[in-house]
Amino acid sequence: MRNVGAALAAWPWVAASVAVVLAAAAAGYVAGRRTAAPNGSAAPSAPGAAPALVRGVIAAHDLAAGADAVQAQLERVLSSAGVHRIPVAGGAAFDAPRHHAVGTEPATGERIDRCVAREIRAGWQTGAQVVRPAEVIVWKR
């Protein structure tokens, strides 16, 4: 995965092109735009197109680790489509609908038991709906 981020950083014009294409696609589908049917009436987009595009942009964000400019552009694309990163703060209470525990670390005190130690992979949400929970390490006694 790091090689993809390095490649995108080495060829910023490729990363910019990918980001622009994904931005246009995600903005169009996620905003609920409709395509014109052959008879001129408005026809809805293909079922599942918006979620698939959003997941694709999120996956591109994950792959661009190390290419901060590319990740920032993809975050702007997601934000313009109404998809925002789930805020994760170390020491915050574990929230099962928004967090997915992928590991534990020993807690040094009772106050931090079952709290988030750190984020491993970003989570994303649209309003109150979780698109992908944040993957976190949790302190445990």
Image (spheres, rainbow, N blue to C red):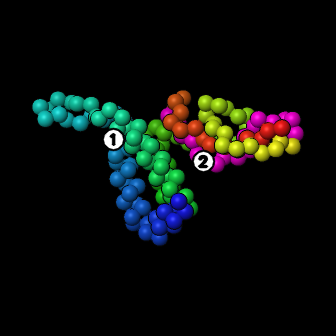
Magenta span contains residue 5: no
Instruction: From the viewer's side, name the closer residue of 36 and 130.
Output: 130
Magenta stretch?
109-126
Residue 14, image x, y percentages:
39, 64
Total numbered circles: 2
Q: Is residue 129 left or right of residue 14?
A: right
Crowding near pointer 2: few (<14 within 10 Å), some, many (20+)? Answer: some
Q: Quadrant of the C terminus?
A: top right
Examine the rendered structure and indicate whether residue 70 appears above or below residue 22. Answer: below
Residue occupying the far left of the picture = 39
Residue 69 in view of the camera? no
* Neighbour tally class for label 1: few under 14, some 14-19, many 20 plus, Cα within 10 Å: some
Q: Would residue 11 be found to the left or right of residue 6 on screen?
A: left
Up/down of 17 relative to 83, above or below: below
Answer whether residue 73 is visible to the viewer in this image: yes
Identify which residue, 123 or 103, lies in the foreground. 103
Q: Residue at x 22, y 30 (%)?
A: 43
Choose top left, top right, bottom left or bottom right for residue 106: top right
Q: Compared to 63, does 138 lie above or below?
A: above
Q: What's the residue type where badge 2 is placed?
A: Arg
What numbered label is drawn on residue 4? none
Question: Which residue bears the numbered disc 1?
Answer: 28
At a point 67% along the width and 32% down the height, the residue shown is 95
Which dot, 2 or 1, sits closer to the camera? 2
* Mark 2 secondary-structure assignment: strand
The first of marks 2 and 1 along the sequence is: 1
Comparing 130 with 84, the one in front is 130
* Mark 1: amino acid: Gly
Judging by the rendered image, the residue that carries numbered circle 2 is 121
Identified at 79% across, 38% down, the residue is 140
In the image, residue 13 lies at what x, y percent?
A: 39, 66
Residue 105: % across, % down: 78, 45
